[in-house]
Image (tube, rainbow, N blue to C red):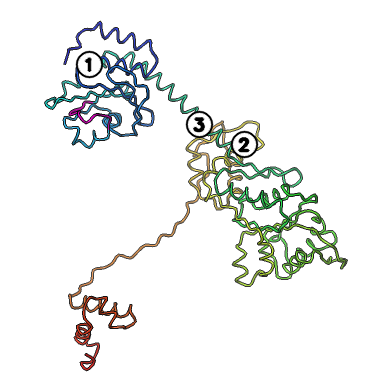
């Protein structure tokens, strides 16, 4: 190894490195200088990325046309970047740490030294030897560290440059992700006059599949059944199906869970009721599972016969109404329990869509939370990563309704622009019932008892068929009879 006593050479290198804000040039020049000092087979220059991965940029002072990327922790460069200390292996072919690095088969030993500033590793210098008698040692580490110590100014400068470059890269990644999110996102806005600020937002695959199917069925005039938990947006999607359809009439909603049988009968079938109002348009029957058999029969008659008799004037009215029914309860179960008319179920189940719960579309929580947080606000606020993590970790039993209420409350109660996790309410933890297997206790068995139990269990499994049991046990039928006799289970005459 040559000495590095010529300060003029280091001073020149320092000036070159300071005037070239390019990591490829930096590691090429640095590796070339070390190669002149060490005089070994190869000196490699690696950049350490912010995520712990490393990039091979140079070899023996020459910049590589294509950088080679190594995963986090891979090879000596990854190991040294993680441990923040030098490492050498004089038997690289048998060293598991060095096994996944970048080297030729002829390399026998390798030394890796971190290029550090203020405790941060920005790169590594790897020296490879093909000499069988070459043993790297602490003196080699000290020699390279002496070079690096005298180059602290350009190393610090490169550190700042890489920090800025990584920040720009992260910002661009976030911008690209946001643009992709916005291009993939589906916003279902309801037209004026139906319900102000009614909107469904999502980009998850299962949500988008339901929306696309709803668009397809909207053009058809069949009844539609929308099922899903409370707060998933069944009424909003039902309204949107109407707006996508060719129907020119109005769209009205009957809330079945809020009315008793007599009230709902008048609400639907009076001369000024919802059936008349929806004529030529769409009637959304919300929570149809709460209707009685009497109401179900009248709805079925309107569907099948296309007419109704008003409850107040007893007038027969011809109907052209598309029915979209919603239900939190699975109607098929109500049919099985005799609580819902089977014929009506099959009529409205012509097209059935199930809207997934928020717990099954966690990737939508972030975009929905951001939307609800700033809905109608002139001064938008921002959710921090900690707040988003807390929101996405919750199981949302109230779905979009619950999320919207929490975001509106959080906006009002939080001062400043940023929403931290601490600003959000403490969510109840989902209780998960786990089946705990009772530990198998040790029971003393003699070999005689163990054999007897196994033979009895085999006979039970094969319904007492001794021929099949003997075959399964790998013994003759005579031997089986002898054993059963010894257990006192058969008489001697049966042998």
Q: How many numbered discs sit on the rendered protein?
A: 3
What range of the chain is rendered magenta? 101-111
What residue is disc 2 on?
374
Determine which quarter of the picture holds residue 368: top right
Crowding near the residue tagged with mark 3, few <14, some 14–19, many ≥20 C-alpha atoms within 10 Å: few
Viewport quadrant of the C terminus: bottom left
Viewport quadrant of the N terminus: top left
Image coords of residue 69 (percent x, y): 36, 30
Q: CA distance from mark 1 to mark 2?
A: 56 Å
Q: CA distance from mark 3 to mark 1?
A: 40 Å
Q: CA distance from mark 2 to mark 3?
A: 20 Å
What residue is disc 1 on?
146
Crowding near the residue tagged with mark 2, few <14, some 14–19, many ≥20 C-alpha atoms within 10 Å: some
Disc 1, SS: helix
Q: Which residue is painted at 58% across and 49% down in the image? A: 209
The numbered dot on residue 308 is none
Image coords of residue 46 (percent x, y): 31, 24
- Lower sequence index among marks 2 and 3: 3
Check contact, mark 1 vs mark 2: CB within 8 A: no
Vertical placement of residue 198 versus 77, above or below: below
What residue is disc 3 on?
174
């Amino acid at each position: 190894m040559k000495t590095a006593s010529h300060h003029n050479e280091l001073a020149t290198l320092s000036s070159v490195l300071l005037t070239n804000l390019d990591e490829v040039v930096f590691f090429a020049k640095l590796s070339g200088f070390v190669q002149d000092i060490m005089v070994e087979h190869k000196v490699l220059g690696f950049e350490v990325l912010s995520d712990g991965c490393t990039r091979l940029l140079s070899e023996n002072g020459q910049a590589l046309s294509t950088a080679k990327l190594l995963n986090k922790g891979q090879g000596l460069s990854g190991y040294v970047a993680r441990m923040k200390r030098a490492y050498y292996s004089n038997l690289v072919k048998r060293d598991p740490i060095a096994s996944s690095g970048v080297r030729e088969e002829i390399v026998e030993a390798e030394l890796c030294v971190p290029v550090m500033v203020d405790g941060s590793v920005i790169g590594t210098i790897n020296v490879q030897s093909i000499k069988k008698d070459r043993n790297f040692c602490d003196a080699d580490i000290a020699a390279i560290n002496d070079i690096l110590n005298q180059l602290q100014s350009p190393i610090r400068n490169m550190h700042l440059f890489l920090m800025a470059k990584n920040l720009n890269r992260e910002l661009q990644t976030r911008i690209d992700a946001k643009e992709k999110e916005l291009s993939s996102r589906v916003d279902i806005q309801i037209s004026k006059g139906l319900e102000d600020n009614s909107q469904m937002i999502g980009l998850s695959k299962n949500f988008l599949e339901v929306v696309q199917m709803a668009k397809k069925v909207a053009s058809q005039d069949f009844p539609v059944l929308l099922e899903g938990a409370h707060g998933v947006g069944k009424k909003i999607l039902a309204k949107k199906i109407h707006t996508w359809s060719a129907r020119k009439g109005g769209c009205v909603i009957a809330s079945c869970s809020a009315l008793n049988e007599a009230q709902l009968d008048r609400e639907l079938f009076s001369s000024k009721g919802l059936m008349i109002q929806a004529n030529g348009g769409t009637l959304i029957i919300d929570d149809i599972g709460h209707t009685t058999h009497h109401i179900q029969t009248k709805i079925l008659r309107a569907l099948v016969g296309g007419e109704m008799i008003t409850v107040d004037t007893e007038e027969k009215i011809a109907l052209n109404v598309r029915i979209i029914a919603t239900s939190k309860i699975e109607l098929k179960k109500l049919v099985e329990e005799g609580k819902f008319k089977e014929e009506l179920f099959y009529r409205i189940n012509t097209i059935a869509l199930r809207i997934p719960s928020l717990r099954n579309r966690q990737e939508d929580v972030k975009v929905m939370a951001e939307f609800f947080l700033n809905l109608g606000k002139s001064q938008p606020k921002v959710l921090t990563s900690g707040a988003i993590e807390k929101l996405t970790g919750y199981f949302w039993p109230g779905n979009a309704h619950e999320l919207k209420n929490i975001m509106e409350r959080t906006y009002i109660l939080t001062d400043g622009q940023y929403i931290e996790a601490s600003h959000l309410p403490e969510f109840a933890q989902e209780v998960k019932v786990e089946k705990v297997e009772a530990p198998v206790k040790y029971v003393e068995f003699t070999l005689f008892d163990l054999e007897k139990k196994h033979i009895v269990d085999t006979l039970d499994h094969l319904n007492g068929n001794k021929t099949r049991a003997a075959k399964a046990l790998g013994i003759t039928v005579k031997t089986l009879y002898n054993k059963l006799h010894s257990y006192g289970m058969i008489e001697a005459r049966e042998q």
